[in-house]
Each structure stands twice: as structure tokens, then as C-alpha cells.
Amino acid sequence: MIQAVFFDMDDTIYDTSGFAAIARRAAVKSMVHNGLKCSEDEGYECLMEIVKEKGSNYDKHFNILTERINGEEDPLIIVNGIITYHNTKFAMLKLEPESFSILLYLKSKNYKVGLITNGKKLKQWEKLVRLGVYPFFDDVVTSEDVGIEKPDVEIFKIAMDRLNVTADTSIMIGNNFDTDIIGACNAGMQSMIINSDITDEQQELLDKRGYTVKKLNNLIDLMKIL
Amino acid sequence: MIQAVFFDMDDTIYDTSGFAAIARRAAVKSMVHNGLKCSEDEGYECLMEIVKEKGSNYDKHFNILTERINGEEDPLIIVNGIITYHNTKFAMLKLEPESFSILLYLKSKNYKVGLITNGKKLKQWEKLVRLGVYPFFDDVVTSEDVGIEKPDVEIFKIAMDRLNVTADTSIMIGNNFDTDIIGACNAGMQSMIINSDITDEQQELLDKRGYTVKKLNNLIDLMKIL
């Protein structure tokens, strides 16, 4: 009997990668328009290399992009990138269509609902507040907050302790096999993978370990295993 | 014969302090609404103390405010402050009424126009781009950029060199007597103080040093001395 449902945030309840891709394309378009000496496709490709090198929480992607393409930093080009990126991101900010119904359903049935996310505390909280969904969550655990990242078993244990539930009554829902699913499995929880394709090998491993993995197309899939 | 007009940015072409005060009040209101345990006035007063202690470019004012008032950081309260602050600031962002006409007038008369500002390069450029006035400026000098702050004479010399003008054909317009006016005076430029009251003592010093100080109420005042 499931009592608590834990969610991952990025690319699970919120299409972080999809929105970031569009916002970055918009930013590069504006930078090219303001003097970045390359095509929009070249600029975007170079930006993605920089994001890969530095990680998504680094705050000088556009400085480096300008330096690599033009040979020097240019504040006009950089701030046009920053402003367009933020304007686009905030204009698009909305929840995955299924997320709101699922959260509402869970609360109506008195499940405990938690969030376990790798990322910076305030950055992740800002998304929850801007999306307007933070009241759905009984608890939010960020890796920055507790100093441990998924798939470390400890972050899942902390999250369960905080909601006063045990692994055999908890399920983790996420998009990332290596962090969300493996971690939850090792913590003894059930889990469900969504927004992600898994290999036959992964599926085999999952079947052996005896916990559920499905693609979440609608509320029905979740209700079936609750 | 004046050939180049240099402007300060904050509280000269843009009412930085006025807009920041409103945005901070809005932020505190939202924080109190979300659980900051004080009145709005108490919260604002405490925030202003923190800004004074840490400077306006520090990026954790709201963290400290939450910790001082509630005894601990609370991400929900902090991000509500941040989001409201930014939304309010961007909603209000506009030029001082006189600034646009003056910049347009100067360009129509082929004056060289520069900006000399103490502050972070990208933060200051972001204002110029969001305000839509950066095309008016032939050159922008930020203290971060050159590693020297007003009133140091060097920053004025660099600005004049970049526009290829001399001190006797340059005027500095700013709101701060101690940085803009004293600095420009020591660099041998004329100057004009605006948006600021000056003491009799300051006026006396200015008269002695033989350069012009006026309150800029409209274009006429500036045209008279050009």
C-alpha cells in the first residue's frame, strides 16, 4: 500500500530541457542579431558544448560563447543573450500537462507528496513558486540542501524520514534511470520512469529487482500501481 | 566649446534608487505574506540595513533578511522576495523623462556622448539594453571594466581618451557630488550636478574651481552651457 509519492523535478514535472533549448535558441538568435559573428546554428552548437563543459548551473555561458566566437567578450552581445534567455524562459514557464492533474489527484486521496531533486536550492524553489505548485508538496529535498545527490541512497532515506514513511510504502517518479530509478531501487522503494526511453537491458534489470517501471501517459498508469 | 558629454547612469539617466525602493518594498510585502515574521515596515527597515552593510551588488540580501527575522533561511520566503523584486523592477523599468530628449538632442547636434559609471559591467549594460538607450552612447566605461572607480581621475581620462576628446571640451553630468563632480573637476572637465541638492559649502567650492553646477530641470539648462 503506497502512502507517499516522491517526484523528481526537472524533465519530470517540468519540461526543463525542452524549455531551456528554446530559450537558448532565442538567446543565440538575439546575440547573432547583435553582433555574434556566426550563424544561429553554429552559435547554438557552440553554446551547447559550453553548457556540457561547464554544467547548466554555471552563470557565464554567454560570456564564453562571445569570447570563443568573436575573440573577446562584448557586453552588448552578452546581455542581449541573458535578457532574451530570461524573457523567453519566463514567458514559457508552465507545468507539464499531466503534472497538475496527478498532483491534484494525489492530494485528494491524501497521499503524502514529496520532491527529491538534484540542484541548487533557490533555483529549484523558484521553479516551484513560479509554476505555482509548491503547495502540493509536503516536503522538498534539494541536493544542495542536504549535501547529497541522487542516486545516493541517503537522499532518498532523508526524504522518507522527513515525511515519516518507509521504503515499502513509497514510490519515486522520475525521468532519469541512473539517478532516480537506480537510487530509489537501492533505497528499497518502488519507482516509475517517465518521459524517457529505457533499454532492454535496463528493463531486464528492473524486472529482476521486482519494482515497477512504466511510461506515464496519463493518470491511469499511476493509479494502477498505487 | 563642448564636444563631448559624459553621463553617470544610476540616479542620473535612470532613477535607480527610486525604482529599487519600490521593488524592495514589493519584495518585502510578498515575503511577509509568505511567512516572514514581521510587519512590512520592519522588514523593509531591516532589508535596508542589510543593503547598507553588504552593498547593493551583494546577491543574498533576502537570505539574510529571512535569517535575521525568522531565525533561519526559508527558500519559499526568499524566492518570493526574489521573484517579486525582479518582476516589479522590470515592470517599472523606464528612462527619466528628460533623459531621452536630452540624448536625442545631443546626437542631433553631433556631440559625442559617453557613459561613466561605477558598477558591474553586465549589470550596467543590462540597464542600457533594457532601457533601449545604448545606441545613444558612443562609449560606455564601467568601473569593473577598467578597474578604477569614480572619483579617481583616471577613469575620466580613460573615457576622454576613448572618445578622443580633451578635458577642456568635455562635460560630466551626474547626481553625486563626491564621485561625479569632484572627479570630473580634478580631471579638468566641466561638470553639471542633477537630481541632487548641494550644500552652500559645496557650491562655494564649485564656484571657486570655475566650473558649472546646475540642477537639470529641462533641456534649456544644458543647452545654455554647451
Image (spheres, coloured by chain):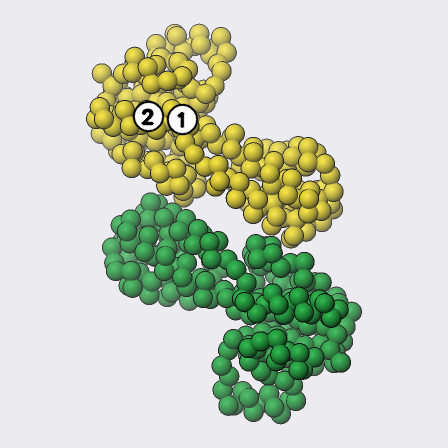
Chain colours: A yellow, B green
The mark found on residue A101 in the picture is 2
Residue plotted at (55% across, 77% down): B217
Residue plotted at (66% across, 78% down): B223
For mark 2, give the secondary structure.
Answer: helix
Q: Which residue is mark 1?
A: A97
Q: Position of residue A123 (x, y in %)?
A: 43, 42
- The amino acid at mark 2 is Ser
Q: Quadrant of residue B194?
A: bottom right
- The amino acid at mark 1 is Pro
Q: Is residue B223 left or right of residue A112?
A: right
For mark 1, give the secondary structure.
Answer: helix
Label 1: how many residues lie within 10 Å, few (<14), some (14-19) or many (20+)? Answer: few
Q: Chain of mark 1?
A: A
Q: Position of residue A205 (x, y in %)?
A: 43, 10
Quadrant of the snapshot with the N terminus of chain B: bottom right
Residue plotted at (35% across, 38% down): A132
Whether residue B72 is situated above or below residue B52 in the rendered picture = above
Q: Is residue A128 left or right of residue A71?
A: left
Return the residue nearer the eye: B102 or A93: B102
Whether residue A92 is situated above or below residue B225 in the rendered picture = above
Dots 2, 1 in contact, CB < 8 A? yes
Whether residue B226 is situated above or below residue A140 in the rendered picture = below
The Cα atoms of the two marked residues, 2 and 1, are separated by 8 Å
